[in-house]
Every structure is written in C-alpha cells, then in structure tokens.
C-alpha cells in the first residue's frame, strides 16, 4: 500500500521520459501548410493542426524533451549546490555555517520568477543549458535548509563519531558516512526542485521571456495563447494538449514526492 | 551600531558585551537580517544593470545612435538623464547616490514616461497584487488547515483519501495552467464567465474609494485570481496540517488529556489545534513569496492589473528602471511579510527566540 501511488507516478514519469527520448526519432518532419490552419482532430492529424498548419501531436511528442531535460539539469544543479554547502555548513559549523545560512535566507526571500523575468529582459536565454543553470542557481535554498537540518541530527550518531575518531577526514565522513544515509531524502528533494524548475521554465516560455527556438510544451502554450487558438473549439487541443502534458508530468513528480515523504515519515502511512 | 560616540566613557569590553547582548535579542537580529537582505538585493540590481556587458544603458545608447543618428555624447547624456546616473562618474559615487536615493524612496524615473517616478508607478499596481494574493493565501491557509486536521482525525477513511487525491491533483497543476483552463472552458467555450468584463483591477468608471460599491467591484475583478490562488495552494496546507496533526495526536499529553476525560472538542482545539498549527506559520511566508512570484503568470492570464501585469509590460518595453523598482519593492514586501510572520511565530513558539532555534 505504502508506495503504490508513488510507483504509479514513477512509471508515468519513466513513460514520459521514454516518449520524449525515443518519440522524436519516429515522428515525421513538420510541414507548414497555410491551407490546413487550425484543423479539428482527424485521422491524419489526431490532435488537429496549429496556426501554421503543423500537426499538434508531433509537436507534443517532440516538445517534452527540452522541458524534461531542463528540469532534470536544473534539479541536479541545485541539488548539488544544496548538498555540498548544506552539509558543509552543518558539519563545520561556526562562521562557515553562519555565512551559508545568511546567503540562503537572502536568496530565499528574493522572488524567483521576478528575478528570472528581470534576467530574461537583460539577456537572451535561448539555450536550454543556460536556462537550466539559471533556474538551478536560484532553486536550492529550501533543499539546503533541510539538508543542513538532517546533517545536524546525523552528525551526532555513533558511527559518525567513530569515523571522526578514526580521523577519516571531512570529505570521507560527509560523502561516505552521512550522505548515503540521506539518499531517499535527497531524491525526494531533487524531484521537488525539478517540479519547481519545470513550473518556472514553462512560465518563462508562456510569458515569452525565453525566446522560442523549438517546439516545446511551453512554446506551444505561448503560441496557442497569443494567436487566439482558445477562441476556436476546433483548435482547442492546441491549448489543452500542452496543459494536460505538463500537468501529468507535474502530477507524476508530485506523487513520487508524496511516497518518498511517506517512507521518511512512517506516522503518515499508519491507518 | 551602539551609539559609541555619545558615550565615550564606556570601556570597549563593556561596549562589546552590550552590543552582543543587543544582537542576541531575537527581534533585533531578525530586523538587521531583513535590512541586510534589502541592501544586498539593491546592490545586486545596481551592478546587474551597470557593470555586466550589454547593460541596458549601452543598449539604449546604441539604439539611440543607430535609430536617430545622434552622437555618442548626446545619446550618453540622454541615457544619463533617463537612468538617473552619469556613466562617466566614478562608480562608488554613483553607488552612494543610488543608495541614498533608495533611502529617500527615489527609484529613478520610468524610461517610457520620463518624469514619472518609478515608485509612483509601482505603488499604483502593487496594492492589487497584495490584495488578491493576501486574501487568497489567507483563505486557503484557513480552509486548508481545517481540512488537514479533519484528514488527520479521519486518517484512512474515505474523506482522507478523497481529499488527498483532490489536493494532489490541484497541487500539481501549475497555477497559470489552472487559470488558462478556467478561461478556456468557463470563459470561452462554455461562456459562463464574462472574462472580458472581469479584466483589470476594477471596472472603468468606478473611482477607487472606501465604499461598498467599490469594494464589491474590486472583489468581482479579483475573484478569479483569488480562486486560482486558493485552489492551487490549499493542498499544501492540508498536507502540512495533516502531518503535524498526526504527529501531535501521537504525543503523550494528548493521551493524558483523553485519560482525564476532557471533551473531544476541547482536546481538538486547545490541545491538538494549538500545537499542530505551529508548522503552518513558517510555511505561510514561503507560500506568500511563491504566490507573489506566480502572480506574474496568473495576472497575465486574467489580465488583472497587479504588479505582475506591470512587470511583463515593463519587460516588453525594456523599461529597466521600472523593472529594477519592481524587483526591489517586491523583495521589500516579501522580506517584511517574512519578518512579521517570524516575529509572530516567535511569540507563538518561544523555543525559536533562543539561539537553539538557529540549528533547525
């Protein structure tokens, strides 16, 4: 019972990733056709066509890869920052800890999306790598706080004291003794960060703050919204398809988080 | 920070002890930290705009030169007037002027409507965001906490399962997508909501005043954003409150209260509720910050004229002074909200006030 829904979420996520990785290899080339604008779903175009007469289903299949890629990268970057500095702060204590905590509190209070919007107005965020770095660079504070709190409680354990007596060195104690014991905790937070990064990424695309260079789900939303696809019931899927795809992706991630939470906090699952 | 010049008699050691004593007062420490945050954000935006390559001043000068064929000197002096700084002056001097300007509430002037102070523009839009986001978060926090407690009491029952399912579903749909779904289905396809009439912060022709008419009109326009904020954040409150209530129910003092034969309603309010609600408070500030950020997207979907609407407008028009001003003012607002919630929390939970509270 305890992780049935979490497992379902995991399966859905894996399927989405597979679709995003393998799918584009089999999709036909998109053709612009001005005579086939906003067609309703049919045998030839299962989800209809967009404002340039291009097939929506093909765009859906191709459009997952950039979103998931940036999400995973941003999640990995911010998780790395949070783990390294959070555990160092908690383990070393003293002024190192104070500095890390102060910086975290400051980054935490700056509204992320507003900062991203300002950055996007100053720079052209056209590469997914740049987007991932920028999204990851501001997403770590929550995770850092919880990593720090966890390491605080773990560093008092006997096996850590034993390692300290053996003089195994800070990197060894942190990465070999303490962090492996927080694996599922870290995984959970990685997924949370990914969820937030995807939220912000699609938001940036939707607002048109990140230039649209390929057909990803966020870009589809932007085009469908700004080109008035919502007003025609024939082209409804142009808006609905990316909304549903993003929601399913987020739902699968959130469900995974929930089951990690249940594993970590056994009181939640007793019934 | 203690007035050292006024009391030269005080010996350094004593002075240091007094400083340390004052620093250890929770409120003082917390206020100092807030001021530091605002100062650092202000500094960050200062250098972001001036120092990095391709900064807006250079961009402005270049477009002026290429579009209107004016000399670099003229373009530079125009830019200096608009961005309220002179690029040729030494940086520390500019920095000092910028900081004193902020301290006096002077955030420069808008690029597009020269002569209009940025602060004026920002303060025109900000109240609507504060109103809609504040009301939305308060409603969802209150309602979500109650439902979360209910879920903890009925753990494993159908209420718990249904509410968990609904809250996960709502929690995972990004708020702007939910807003789009509302517009697409209820506004356009089914045509039940007058989306076009609900745009803006209040109806044209209505003057902002403190009357019942105006308040109900403002509520009418804010109702859609508020609905979205409530629906998308309520799941988070339910989860926090459920987890914390479950924890509290397992405590010994609850068992003792039950053994003493206290009424269930009294146990639920005075024993469980008061303790279980504590983790909700730190969450309040976090959610507030998140919703203020997300309001940019939601306000854009509903065309609600709050700070997010202004932000996107300024991005599209490259109105950098206004952008800077929004970032600064919103940061100050979030910092202030954090400060208030932390101070409230330290009243509610005295453990936070000590230095021990810092370790968690």
Image (tube, rainbow, N blue to C red):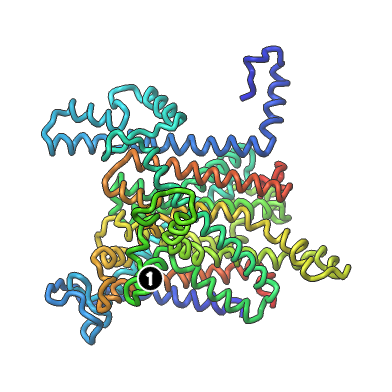
In this picture, is B12 found above or below B317? above
Q: Is residue A53 left or right of residue B137?
A: left
Q: Position of residue B107 (x, y in %)?
A: 39, 34
A44 lies left or right of A162: left
Nearer to the camera, B148 or B121: B121
Residue B164's place in the image compared with A205, above or below, is below
Whether residue A173 is visible, yes or no, is: no
The answer to whether residue A185 shows anywhere in this view is yes
Quadrant of the rendered structure where residue A71 is?
A: bottom left
The total number of labels drawn is 1
Q: Residue at x 36, y 48 (%)?
A: B311
| Location of residue A235 by image quarter | bottom left
Query: Residue B165 location in percent, x, y?
Result: 54, 76
Instruction: Measuring from the top left, give residue B196's x and y in whole percent.
Output: 32, 64
- Mark 1 nearby-residue class (10 Å; few <14, some 14–19, many ≥20): some
**Quadrant, the N terminus of chain B:** top right
């Amino acid at each position: 019972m305890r992780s049935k829904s979490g497992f379902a979420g995991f399966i859905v996520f894996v399927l989405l990733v597979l679709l995003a990785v393998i799918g584009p290899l089999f999709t036909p080339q998109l053709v612009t056709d001005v005579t086939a604008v906003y067609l309703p779903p049919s045998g030839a175009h299962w989800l209809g066509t967009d404002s340039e007469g291009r097939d929506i289903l093909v765009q859906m299949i191709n459009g997952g890869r950039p979103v998931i890629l940036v999400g995973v990268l941003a999640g990995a970057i911010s998780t790395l920052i949070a783990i390294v500095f959070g555990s160092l702060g908690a383990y070393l204590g003293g002024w190192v800890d104070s500095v890390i905590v102060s910086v975290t509190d400051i980054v935490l209070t700056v509204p992320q999306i507003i900062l991203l919007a300002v950055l996007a107005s100053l720079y052209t965020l056209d590469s997914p790598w740049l987007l991932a770095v920028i999204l990851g660079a501001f997403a770590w504070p929550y995770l850092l706080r919880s990593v720090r709190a966890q390491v605080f409680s773990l560093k008092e354990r006997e096996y850590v004291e034993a390692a300290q007596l053996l003089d195994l060195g800070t990197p060894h104690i942190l990465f070999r003794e303490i962090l492996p014991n927080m694996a599922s905790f870290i995984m959970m937070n990685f997924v949370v960060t990914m969820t937030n990064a995807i939220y912000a990424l699609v938001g940036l695309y939707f607002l048109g703050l990140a230039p649209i260079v390929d057909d990803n789900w966020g870009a589809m939303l932007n085009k469908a919204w700004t080109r008035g696809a919502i007003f025609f019931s024939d082209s409804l899927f142009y808006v609905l398809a990316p909304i549903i795809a993003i929601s399913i992706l987020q739902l699968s991630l959130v469900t995974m988080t929930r089951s990690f939470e249940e594993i970590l906090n056994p009181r939640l699952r007793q019934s | 920070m203690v007035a050292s010049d006024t009391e030269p008699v005080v010996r350094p050691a004593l002075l240091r002890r007094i400083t340390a004593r004052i620093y250890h007062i929770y409120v003082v420490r917390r206020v100092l930290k807030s001021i530091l945050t605002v100062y650092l954000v202000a500094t960050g935006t200062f250098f972001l705009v001036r120092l990095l390559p391709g900064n807006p001043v250079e961009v402005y000068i270049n477009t002026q030169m290429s579009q209107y064929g004016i000399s670099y000197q003229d373009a530079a002096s125009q830019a200096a007037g608009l961005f309220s700084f002179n690029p040729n002056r030494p940086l520390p001097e500019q920095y000092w002027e910028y900081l004193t300007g902020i301290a006096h509430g002077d955030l420069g002037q808008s690029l597009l409507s020269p002569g209009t102070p940025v602060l004026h523009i920002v303060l025109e839009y900000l109240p609507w965001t504060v109103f809609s986001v504040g009301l939305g978060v308060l409603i969802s926090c209150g309602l979500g906490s109650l439902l979360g407690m209910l879920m903890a009491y009925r753990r494993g029952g159908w209420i718990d399962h249904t509410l968990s399912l609904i809250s996960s579903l709502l929690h995972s749909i990004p708020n702007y997508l939910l807003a789009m779904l509302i517009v697409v289905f209820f506004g356009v396809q089914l045509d039940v909501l007058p989306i076009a009439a609900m745009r803006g912060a209040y109806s044209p022709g209505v003057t902002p005043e403190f009357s019942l008419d105006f308040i109900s009109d403002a509520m009418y326009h804010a109702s859609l954003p508020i609905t979205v904020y409530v629906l998308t954040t309520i799941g988070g409150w339910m989860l926090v409150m459920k987890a914390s209530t479950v924890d509290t129910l397992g405590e010994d003092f609850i068992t003792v209260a039950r053994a003493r034969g206290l009424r269930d309603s009294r146990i639920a309010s005075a024993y469980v509720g008061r303790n279980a609600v504590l983790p909700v408070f730190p969450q309040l500030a976090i959610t507030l910050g998140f919703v203020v950020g997300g309001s940019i997207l939601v306000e854009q979907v509903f065309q609600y004229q709050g700070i997010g609407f202004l932000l996107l407008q300024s991005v599209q028009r490259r109105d950098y002074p206004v952008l800077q001003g929004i970032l600064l003012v919103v940061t100050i607002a979030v910092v202030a909200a954090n400060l208030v919630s932390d101070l409230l929390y330290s009243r509610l939970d005295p453990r936070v006030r000590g230095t021990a509270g810092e370790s968690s």
